[in-house]
Amino acid sequence: MLFLLSCVASAFLIAFIVMPVLINVLTRRQILDIGGRRKIHKGFVPSMGGIAIFIGFAFSTMVWMPYAELAYYRYFCGAMLILFVTGMRDDLAPLSPRGKLVMQLMAAFLVAWGGGNDEGIRITSFYGFMGIHELPLVVSYLLSIFFIIVVTNAFNLIDGLDGLAGLIGLIAFTILAGWFLLVRDTHNHSWAMGLLLVGFIGGIVGFLCYNWHPASIFMGDTGSLLLGFVLSVGAIKFLQLNGSESLISDLKLGAPLSMAAAIAFIPLFDTGRIFLLRISQGRSPFSPDKLHVHHLLMRVGLKHSQVALIMGGAYLALVGVVFVLSHMLSDNLLIPILIATGVGLHFLLSYVVDSVFDKRRDKVQDYVAALNSGR
């Protein structure tokens, strides 16, 4: 336990110390996120806070991670570096969507390939879901790369509110790290993955100290692309280890696909929801708007910190329920329940937003009527 606390503390301290220096440098060099239009914030706020998160993680990993375990995850670490550099380049001078996609494909393939041996992190099985078990190699590669890219970009899209992406990432990484550290497979690969995530946990906490509303800095694509990528790969590694014969633990779940989906639920739900809404309105799914969940919750009168805590709390509750049900139900039952939950949450959110605006409209109409009657 002391070892893990040292790992978290070192990552936190480095990120916490680097952050004000980074804010000062970015402000002096005018590397700022301009508020207005589709942005919730106003004024000029430094971006690229993901640099401090990455530095904290890198320092903690190099100090505390045994070399043999670090070498095992060298392809994953190399892929993280690709996403970090891509996000940093995009924050400095926007890359084209095609350019970002190419870099993400490279990173996703590098992780899935893993040198062509057992170091590849891929979705290799459906574990009995719809009667499907082992996947053909080509399908395994394509599905894994697709999942990584979708979750990476979906996480990037929820980074639109002070503290939200950092809090969701913190919860997700803590859940995954806890599972990896507790199960312990015979090869010790789960422990090493948990230690990697612990480094990110410390870095995110250091970042949130400056990103909680009112934010002094945003993580930018430098942070959101990196965290989304690590989240997607962590979910796939969870699937791999949970289905491995080398894993003997009471925490081995009977519905691993459902648990992986729950861990990535917030970004997937939000992105899937707005894509379907845009398509139903005859617009491109990539067209900009303010239909994200956090936008709608802000419109009903909630503050930044309230929205972040509500979404974080709902996310934590969902993952907890799915974890419990994963010991009792199969993916064939639990995945439809998750989909139904997403649909229900969409209609509940729409109902709440519409109710608030109906009440506001009625108040305006009553006010106008009172003015007219007084003339």
Image (cartoon, rainbow, N blue to C red):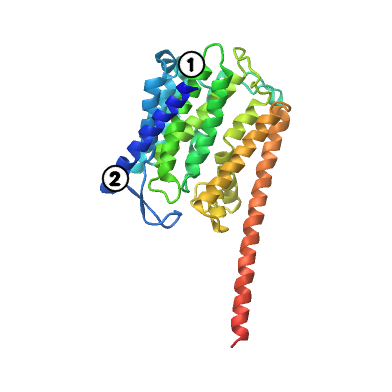
Visible residue check, residue 206: yes
Judged from the image, the secondary structure of the residue bearing numbered disc 2 is helix
Q: Which labelled disc corresponds to residue 24?
A: 2
| Amino acid type, residue under disc 2 in the picture | Asn
Q: Where is residue 364 shown, x and y percent of the image? A: 60, 72
Judged from the image, the secondary structure of the residue bearing numbered disc 1 is loop
Q: Quadrant of residue 369?
A: bottom right
Q: Where is residue 58 shown, x and y percent of the image? A: 37, 27
Q: Which labelled disc corresponds to residue 234?
A: none
Q: Where is residue 270 shown, x and y percent of the image? A: 57, 44
Q: Which labelled disc corresponds to residue 119?
A: 1
Pick out the residue farthest to the front: 2
Image quarter in which the C terminus is found = bottom right
Residue 135, above or below 349: above
Residue placed most toward the observer, 223 or 201: 201
Please rate how many residues cluster around mark 1, counting C-alpha atoms within 10 Å: few if below 14, some from 14 to 19, many from 20. some
Residue 312, above or below 175: below
